[in-house]
Amino acid sequence: MDISTVAGLVLATLAIIGSILYGSPLSIFIDIPSVVVVIGGVIATTLIKWPMENVKALVAYYMKSVFSTPVDAKAMIEEIQKLAETARRESVFALEKVPVEDKFLKKAVTLAADNRPPEVITSILSLEIAAMEDRHSKGVDMLEGMGADGPAFGMIGTLIGLVQMLQNMSDPSSIGPAMAVALLTTFYGSVIANVFTIPIAAKLKQRSKLEATKMNIIVAGVLGIVAGENPRVIREKLDSFLPPGDRLVADDKGKE
């Protein structure tokens, strides 16, 4: 579980509810017609924009922001270095017998052990990376779209409320409550956008970038193994993907 996502959602919700309760009862911020306009509108536009199979996967996309396996690029580089040492000590064909948990690394190692040409390995693995990025972009685009639609339908609901209020100006005492109800749809739309959709889309986008970085590390490492490069050289090459403090050279200097 990603604690930061859960903590952020909980803190944002508590901050909003707490600020409401500080000055008024929570009940005045609950208006069923406003909820119907905003939530119903966001759902409707999402159905219009996207095929049903993508809409059905929305919950799965959302949950990936909460539950996921962290990407450890440094650990992956160390594993590739060990594979390079095995290939140098025995042969590249010996890699097929080495147990590998990561599916993409397993595929790359299998291609290398099958003696595929470097250009073929690059082509196959690049297509795999592109497919992964395309899958992830669908969830990001859906959530960003919902984040844009929420405030839009909030404004639509506000305009509906204002029209209804202006049609009943004969009772001045009703103008204030009617205006408050009209503004609730804008409030709902802003909460949907700025708490529950756009931040989640940003988290998924970051996760996708980290996954792509890990996959590119694997591609570069396996190509180095196929080319017969020294494991140390491969490690130094892959270290360029890491922050300076996590690189092997930095670690060595720290020990001296």
Image (cartoon, rainbow, N blue to C red):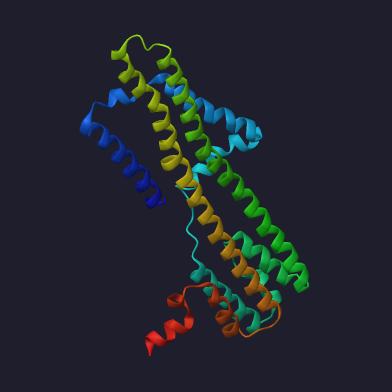
| Residue 246 in the image: above or below residue 67 | below
In-image side of 50 versus 9 (left or right): right
How far across and down, in percent of the image, does residue 122 sit? 72, 68
User: Is residue 249 visible in this depiction of the protein?
Assistant: yes
Q: Name the spot of residue 107 as percent of width and height, x first.
A: 67, 63
Left or right of 117, for residue 140: left
In this view, 256 is above or below 79: below
Q: Is residue 103 left or right of residue 36?
A: right
Q: Residue at x 21, y 34 (%)?
A: 22
Residue at 61% across, 59% down: 103
Quadrant in the picture for residue 161: top left
Nearer-the-camera pick, 77 or 168: 168
From the viewer's perspective, is residue 148 above or below residue 73? Answer: above
Of all residues, the one furthest to the top in this rendering is: 170
Q: Position of residue 235 (x, y in %)?
A: 56, 80
**Number of numbered discs visible in the structure rendering:** 0
